[in-house]
Image (cartoon, rainbow, N blue to C red):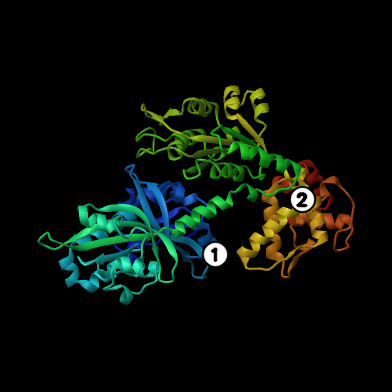
């Protein structure tokens, strides 16, 4: 548990930076005054809440590396997220993540520093418009400008650069000494230099320019895309004395977008078995449509990965992908999460909150574990699927959205329909395009390919150079029944990486459940230590019970045994 800290007694990077601290469970434990101003929430309201409740769903996105900071202590800067504040105003934030360490040096939380991008840009414009004061307080201005993450430059009426902040130097590669006095077009050689130059347009029309995308050439000859804002500079008498340009490097943002799209390409859904080849063929036809998709498969088979692949390979790829775990929330909370609520709709509804359908407008909403949705929510879902219309909880205004729905479940929904647990009309509305993901035990030909994929990934993550697995270890992996499917296989390889000190994973590096392999079928054999089966079986039971903290239910699941069989074995070996 992280002890609360008083942020206001600690210096922050800039007066307009909001600062909050989360513990290892990503719950807020401290909230600064500036954070209150930016978000609209008081510290009393924010402390104890999950981070995503305050800064929005972008903080749970795979591209937001807060878990990396928690696990590895890494610092991340200039992370861009969008969130809706308490007053229902969408804001763009620039976020920095820093580890918070205890006295032993262990990461016990994360310090989240954030600033409103619009406020920072507005500050830059205000500072530049007051040219006379800027000239008098040059050192003070430079200190402020150098704290801004956007590049900022100013020019005089002859197009000569008169100021060039630290971020501008970092983006372009030119030092301040190299830039000052130079013609900005000659220095940066932008793709819009000439009649389409945003700065020229501002000087000629007197109107500012916002978010114009152009390319510039850096000192080392590299072309990079930037987003440009421009405005005029005036003296105290209202005379134009130049112009100011702020610009942001878009190359990292575009690279992240490409990496995200790359991550969810179809060829990253690994498998050469016949069921997987049939899946690839089906996905190629599904992505270009807006049809509702129902993905069915056991836990750990990769349902969300397939849903994301459909989204990022289709026409909605540049729109939001919003995921909701329907089994993780109570009925009342799920309804509010999906459809939003009006202020005062229920106790604790202190503000109007948009739901996931609104946040996914134009994009894709992924409803995971749809089989756990209550009958009342099923009725509202059916209407949205039919009409793309709904009302927030406690509201009367009908909202319209354009959302593609992809649902997933590890249940047999048709059987749930027969039992009366799931509406038949909703089932057929969801099941327009059915996709079934085979369990790993039915596609064991893919195990070697998946194992090598995970080895490559963990080599990069852990900085190791493990070549592969031994033939005995692969045989063990192939014979195991994998109740947790691909997720369990990934976990097994990660555990083996931690235990392996050489360049090859052997049987002893694998988890106890995998080493046991065929324990559930009561096959008598000798394990790698040469001990008789009963002795080896006892040791496996002990190790698995330790791994699951003594939970018999979880131990039975991992060993593929019934709870009664596990109880008999524990009694047999004196483990009760």
Find out whether the residues at labels 1 and 2 contact each other: C-beta distance under 8 Å: no
Q: What residue occupies the far left of the structure in this picture?
A: 237
Q: Nearer the viewer, mark 1 or mark 2?
A: 1
Ranked by sequence position, the earlier of labels 1 and 2 is: 1
Residue located at (63% from left, 23% from top) = 420
The part of the image, by quadrant, that contains residue 467 is bottom right
Of 463 and 45, which appears nearest the observer?
Answer: 463
Up-down: is 224 above or below 295?
Answer: below
Q: Is residue 510 left or right of residue 171?
A: right
The percent coordinates of residue 148 (x first, y second) are 33, 64
The part of the image, by quadrant, that contains residue 128 is bottom left
Q: CA distance from mark 1 to mark 2?
A: 39 Å
**Residue hosting label 1:** 72
Residue located at (12% from left, 59% from top) = 238
Q: Is residue 502 left or right of residue 27?
A: right
Q: What residue occupies the far bottom of the structure in this picture?
A: 177
Q: What residue occupies the far front of the structure in this picture?
A: 195
User: How many numbered marks, from 0 up?
Assistant: 2
**Residue hosting label 2:** 576
Residue located at (65% from left, 64% from top) = 459
The percent coordinates of residue 271 (x first, y second) are 71, 48
Q: Residues within 10 Å of mark 2 (few under 14, many from 20)?
A: few
Of 568 and 78, which appears nearest the observer?
Answer: 78
Q: Is residue 243 visible?
A: yes
Label 2, secondary structure: give it. Answer: loop
The part of the image, by quadrant, that contains residue 216 is bottom left
Of 270 and 82, which appears nearest the observer?
Answer: 270
The percent coordinates of residue 96 (x first, y second) are 42, 61
The percent coordinates of residue 113 (x first, y second) are 39, 60
Up-down: is 514 above or below 222?
Answer: above
Q: Is residue 546 visible?
A: no
Label 1, secondary structure: give it. Answer: helix
């Amino acid at each position: 548990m992280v002890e609360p800290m008083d942020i206001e007694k600690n210096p922050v990077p800039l007066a307009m930076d909001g600062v909050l601290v989360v513990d290892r469970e990503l719950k807020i434990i401290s909230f600064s005054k500036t954070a209150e101003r930016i978000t609209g929430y008081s510290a009393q309201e924010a402390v104890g809440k999950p981070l995503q409740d305050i800064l929005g769903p972008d903080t749970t996105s795979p591209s937001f590396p807060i878990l990396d900071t928690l696990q590895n202590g890494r610092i991340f800067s200039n992370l861009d997220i969008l969130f809706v504040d308490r007053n229902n105003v969408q804001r763009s934030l620039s976020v920095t993540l820093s580890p918070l360490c205890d006295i032993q040096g262990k990461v016990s939380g994360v310090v989240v520093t954030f600033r409103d991008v619009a406020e920072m840009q507005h500050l830059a414009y205000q500072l530049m418009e007051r040219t006379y004061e800027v000239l008098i307080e040059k050192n003070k201005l430079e200190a402020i400008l150098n704290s801004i993450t956007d590049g900022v430059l100013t020019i005089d009426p002859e197009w000569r650069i008169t100021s060039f902040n630290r971020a501008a130097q970092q983006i372009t590669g030119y030092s301040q000494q190299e830039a000052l006095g130079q013609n900005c077009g000659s220095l940066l050689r932008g793709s819009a230099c000439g009649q389409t130059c945003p700065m020229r347009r501002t000087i000629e029309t007197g109107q500012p320019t916002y978010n114009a995308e152009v390319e510039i050439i850096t000192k080392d000859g590299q072309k990079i895309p930037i987003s440009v804002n421009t405005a005029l500079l005036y003296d105290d008498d209202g005379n134009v004395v130049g112009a100011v340009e702020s610009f942001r490097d878009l190359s990292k943002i575009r690279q992240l977008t490409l990496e995200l799209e790359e991550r969810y390409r179809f060829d990253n859904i690994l498998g050469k078995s016949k069921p997987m080849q049939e899946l690839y063929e089906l996905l190629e036809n599904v992505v270009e449509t807006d049809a509702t998709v129902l993905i069915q498969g056991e836990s750990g088979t990769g349902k969300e990965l397939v849903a994301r692949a459909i989204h990022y390979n289709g026409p909605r790829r540049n729109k939001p992908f919003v995921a909701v775990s329907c089994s993780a929330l109570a009925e009342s909370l799920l309804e509010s999460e999906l459809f939003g609520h009006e202020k005062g709709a229920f106790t604790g509804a202190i503000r109007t909150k948009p739901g996931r359908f609104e946040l996914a407008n134009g994009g894709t909403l992924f409803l995971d574990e749809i089989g756990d949705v209550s009958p009342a929510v099923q009725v509202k879902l059916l209407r949205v699927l039919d009409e793309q219309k709904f009302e927030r909880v406690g509201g009367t205004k009908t909202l319209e959205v354009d959302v593609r729905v992809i649902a997933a479940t590890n249940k047999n929904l048709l059987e749930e329909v027969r039992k009366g647990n799931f509406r038949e009309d909703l089932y057929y509305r969801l099941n327009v395009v059915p996709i079934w993901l085979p369990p790993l035990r039915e596609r064991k030909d893919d195990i070697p390919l998946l194992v090598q994929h995970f080895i490559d990934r963990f080599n990069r993550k852990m900085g190791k150079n493990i070549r592969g697995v031994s033939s005995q270890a692969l045989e063990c992996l192939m014979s195991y029944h994998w109740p947790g499917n691909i997720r369990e296989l990934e976990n097994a390889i990660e555990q083996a990486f931690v235990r392996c000190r050489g360049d090859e994973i052997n049987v002893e590096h694998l988890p106890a459940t995998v080493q046991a392999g065929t324990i559930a079928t009561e096959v008598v054999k000798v394990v790698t230590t040469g001990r008789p089966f009963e002795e080896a079986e006892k040791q496996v039971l002990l190790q698995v019970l330790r791994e699951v903290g003594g939970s018999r239910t979880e131990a039975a699941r991992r060993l593929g045994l019934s709870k009664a069989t596990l109880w008999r074995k524990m009694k047999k070996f004196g483990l009760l």
